[in-house]
Amino acid sequence: MLATDIPALPRGVRLHHDKVRDTWVLLAPERAITLDPVGHAILTEVDGTRSFGEITGTLAERYNAPIDQIVKDSAGFLDALRNRRFLDVAP
């Protein structure tokens, strides 16, 4: 994923807090993914307007983590979501 790419949740995909299991899930028609705290932190920054570079910069600052590690982890996670059609990416 490039720093200028803009990730967005496609129509019909949304974050949802499962109160029964007390966990966050990513819901899509007839599909769901349970999110760990890292995945949830990344997806809460995805708003369809900010670039991947802006998102990872915000995460690195918020969690006082090395930007290279945030970029690597976030890119892997978001690419996996894109491959499963839970995420759209605009150049």
Image (spheres, helix red, strand yellow):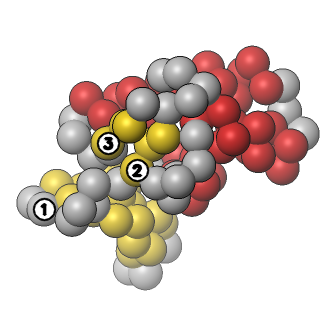
Q: Identify the disc placed on residue 88.
A: 3
Residue 90 showing in the rendered view: yes
Which residue in the protein does label 2 denote? 8
Which of pointers 1 and 3 indicates the residue nearer the eye? 3
Disc 2 crowd rating (10 Å Cα; few below 14, some 14-19, many 20+) is: many
- For marks 2 and 1 on the same chain, the one whose residue lies earlier in the sequence: 2
Q: Position of residue 13 (x, y in %)?
A: 27, 61
In the image, is residue 24 above or below residue 50? below
- For marks 1 and 3 on the same chain, the one whose residue lies earlier in the sequence: 1
Disc 3 crowd rating (10 Å Cα; few below 14, some 14-19, many 20+) is: some
Q: Residue furthest left?
A: 30
Which residue in the protein does label 1 denote? 29
Q: Is 41 left or right of 86, judged from the image as shown?
A: right
Q: Position of residue 40 (x, y in %)?
A: 54, 54
Disc 3 on helix, strand or loop? strand
Q: Residue 91, located in which quarter of the rendered image?
A: top left
Disc 2 on helix, strand or loop? strand
**Cβ–Cβ below 8 Å for labels 1 and 3?**
no
In the image, is residue 8 above or below residue 69? below
Q: Residue 51, located in which quarter of the rendered image?
A: top right
Disc 1 on helix, strand or loop? loop
Q: Identify the disc placed on residue 15.
A: none
Q: Residue at x 10, y 60 (%)?
A: 30
Kind of residue indicated by mark 2: Ala
Measured in 3D between alpha carbons, the distance from the residue under mark 2 to the one under mark 3, in whole angstroms, is: 5 Å
Q: Residue 69, located in which quarter of the rendered image?
A: top right
Q: Is 90 left or right of 37, judged from the image as shown?
A: left
Kind of residue indicated by mark 3: Asp
Kind of residue indicated by mark 1: Pro
Q: Position of residue 67 (x, y in %)?
A: 79, 26
